[in-house]
Image (spheres, rainbow, N blue to C red):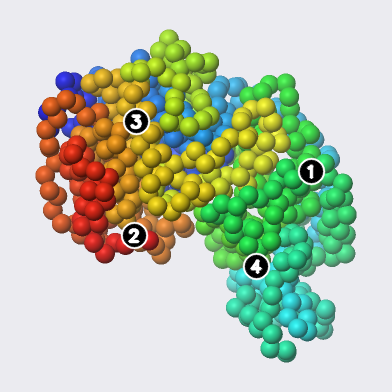
Amino acid sequence: MIPPDKWLPIDSSFDSAFADRLARYETYNKHHYRPNTYLHKWWGRRCGSTFRLILKGLVDDAEARDYYRPGGLAGKVILDPMMGGGTTLHEAIRLGASVMGVDVDPIPVLQARATLTGRPLADLQAAFDQFYEALVEALGDTFRSHCPRCDEPVPLWYTLYGLRRRCGCREVLVVDSLTLRHEPDGAILSWCGECGELVHAGDHRCRGGSVTVIDKSETECHLCGERYRELTELPFYARYAMLAVAGHCPQHGLFHKSPDWRDRAAVARADDGRARLPLNAEEFCVEAGDKSIQLLRRNVHTYLDLFSSRQLAVLSAAARLLPDADPVVRLNLALLVSTSLEFNSMLCGHKGIKKRRAGAVRHTFAHHGYSFPYTALENNPIYPRRASGTLQKLYHSRIARGRRWAAAPTERSLDGGAATMRVIDGEFDGGQEVASPGDLRADSHRFFLWQGSATRLPVAAHSIDAVVTDPPYFDSIQYGDLAAFFRVWLRRFLPDAADWAYDGTAAAVNSERDGEARHYVAAMGAIFGECRRVLMPERGRLIFTFHHWQPRAWAALTAALHQAGFVLLNRYVVHAEHPMSVHISNMHALTHDAILVLAPRAAGHAARWPEPEATARRDSYRFTEYCASFMGRLLDRAEFSAGDIERLWDEALPGNGKG
């Protein structure tokens, strides 16, 4: 091709090997590496180290281009039109750029505002302490149990429930496994199937009882021969019955026990008070979507039913007790309560069976969708210890640790083979919010956030240095649909902070649209076209990551870019996903991303990309490289139609399927 008048470093070089080494560390636990970007749940985040390297490729000064040197982007404006988790914004503002973030969903906008706006950690800590103490004062007695050895009252940690099912002759409680946990001393704690008591193997003489507990593998009653059925006529929380409680005694340590009359009475009192909570079910309706349809199929029509009565009482009190003095402090704490829902619903399961266990709670979206446990875990959000999913744990990991990291960001150093963490002196992760995109160039470290569709941006033409993003994939998980689980509560906590009645159908990937590529091409083509309008001439770049197994996904992306008038300058391949990641395991999943560097098609453009060599289908790296190169070849040809592009992709990837 005829090169642009001004080459940028990333046009011709990118240290893929270095990016790959960093990403292989970061993909294991991304939230440990950049905690300030993980205040609230979001899905599909890419490695911050990869995006830091991408942005370093836009730095003019060769010395400042070094990965471990601070800054380099002062005076530049970076746009992410589909910001999601906010990775681009955080990485760019650290390097001194001013940034603009756009998303149709309010959660990414609110999270970016909370994490980029500076507030002293002492102020956040004081507000959290006051808020937490008020919650405990109001509801501490609701979450209380007693040590089975000394009978002293102690805070409840969590309660385990079995799923109620019926056959023609009886009701049973179904659990994932009759074994609850393997103790460090080798003992096995399990439920007796005949009476439901929690016992150590070999120490129990069953006298029978009214409760029968079975393993989930048992689907038919051996007495009457009928299949067990779920009690879908009941509210979801009422489809479970209590089987065990866990707590920690100061004198005797951790315990698991069968619930006694006091434990059952506490749940009964909460259930009796449920109807008196000031919560309107109509404000929490489940609307049909690709993922939420799973709830409707199980006769769950309100998100309220996904929480125990005790958990609902905490959420109702939280809405009343969140501080009002500082909107940013309230925003941080509201997001904290909202993200805690992932660990505090009756969709949570128990994963503490093994001797070596990272935490007891299998969170709501462990499988990137709704799953329905047999053994449900009712977590106590106001448990005083920093246990999995509690407000104490989440405050210290998401806010306190995040703010400390933001003040002195660190990067993993690979010098000498041993990985260590290095503070990047002179950098900080935060900035000043401005009221208009026109104010972004007045200084560095400024940010502008806009909730809306990126097809029509409130930005002047030729005013953006680079667009760096991670677009939705053609048939990807419906994150906007899943996010409704949180939005219904954030709307209650922060009624004036966002447009809660936004049009979700504006998303490029949307379950309400048809399953063909037409909507994706039209929506992404409009977004890319708007990116082209706002990019600076000559040096403006569109850079994003992408991978997919199916030709129709690459065809849709290619058609959208072709429609918007972009050509591919270069492509690089980096590690993107840990192969054991829950949502890609046992799938035809790729573990690499293509980094695509694009520029607006210039007059006199000449073809640059040759026909790539045939790809190795089972090699994630080679397959991704091939697809990116083939896309470059198609974008070179201005005369191709969308139909031509789809046909050529089908020919290039025969056998990969269209489903």
Q: CA distance from mark 4 to mark 1?
A: 27 Å
Identify residue for label 4. Answer: 374
Q: Secondary structure at mark 1?
A: loop
Instruction: Tell me the mark number nearer the camera, choosing from 2 and 4.
Output: 2
Q: Earlier in the sequence, mark 3 or mark 2?
A: 3
Q: Amino acid at mark 1?
A: Leu
* Sooner in the amino-acid sequence: mark 2 or mark 4: 4
CB of mark 2 within 8 Å of CB of mark 4? no
Residue occupied by mark 1 = 279
Between the C-alphas of marks 3 and 2, the distance is 27 Å
Residue 595: image location, x then y, percent: 29, 40
Q: Rounded to the nearest whole Å, what is the CA distance between mark 1 and mark 2?
A: 45 Å
Which secondary structure lies at badge 4? Answer: loop
Question: Which label sits in the foreground, 3 or 4?
Answer: 3
- The answer to whether residue 583 is seen in the rendering is yes
Question: Which residue position holds label 3?
Answer: 529
- The reply to whether dot 3 and dot 4 touch (C-beta < 8 Å) is no
Mark 1 crowdedness (10 Å alpha carbons): few <14, some 14-19, many ≥20: some
Label whose residue precedes the other's in the sequence (3 or 4): 4
**The disc labelled 2 sits on which kind of residue?**
Lys
Q: Residue at x 42, y 19 (%)?
A: 459
Are circles 4 and 1 on residues that touch, CB within 8 Å?
Answer: no
Q: CA distance from mark 2 to mark 4?
A: 35 Å
